[in-house]
Amino acid sequence: MSKLITWSDRYSVGVARIDAQHQRLVELLNEFHAAMLAGGGRAAVGKTLDGLVDYTLSHFAAEEALMKHVAYPGYEQHKAEHTKLIEQVKLLTGKAQTAGSALTLEVAAFLQHWLTDHIANVDKKYGPHLIAAGIK
């Protein structure tokens, strides 16, 4: 199977439960990509995408709860990024469900870029703060 993203340590924030959630997000994005490549049809691709979006929402809630718990100073900005992503994904997925495969590829590319960039450049910032607060 062709993977859209391969997990590596460069994505690790150093907090086991968050790293596990990020790894699951990568798996779900790869499953979505595989469903598209396999020509799974709108229903199969849509179901995979819905699962990815649902997991992302629960991951964001868990991440935000941890940041709030340790009074992470970048919490508000980080939460705003999450909110912006959710709005963009909802817009793109709504269009993808009616427009078909071309937009589905756009959704995959958007999610791939966002996920790798967000984890590597934004989430990594809170890792040391959580670890210093005793969250491993």
Image (tube, rainbow, N blue to C red):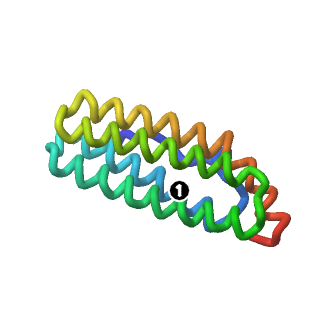
Mark 1 lies on residue: 23
Q: Position of residue 59 (x, y in %)?
A: 52, 61
Q: Position of residue 103 (x, y in %)?
A: 27, 30
Query: Is 37 left or right of 120, judged from the image as shown?
Result: left
Name the residue nearer the viewer: 54 or 23: 54
Q: Is residue 136 left or right of residue 24?
A: right
Q: Is residue 104 above or below residue 48?
A: above
Name which quarter of the figure residue 105 lies in.
Answer: top left
Q: What residue is drawn where x is 69% and y is 62%?
A: 67
How many labels sit on residues? Answer: 1
Mark 1: few/some/many CA within 10 Å (<14, 14-19, 20+): some
Q: Residue at x 64, y 48 (%)?
A: 78
Give the residue type that dot 1 points to: Gln
Badge 1 element:
helix
Name the residue: 57% across, 66% down.
62
Using the image, determine if residue 38 lies above or below residue 54: above
Quadrant of image for the C terminus:
bottom right
Please give left or right for residue 85 compared with residue 69 in the image: left
Seen as rendered, the residue at the extreme right is: 132
Find residue 110 and report its image quarter. Answer: top left
Residue 121 image point, x, y percent = 68, 40
Quarter of the image containing the N terminus?
A: top left
Q: Residue at x 35, y 36 (%)?
A: 107
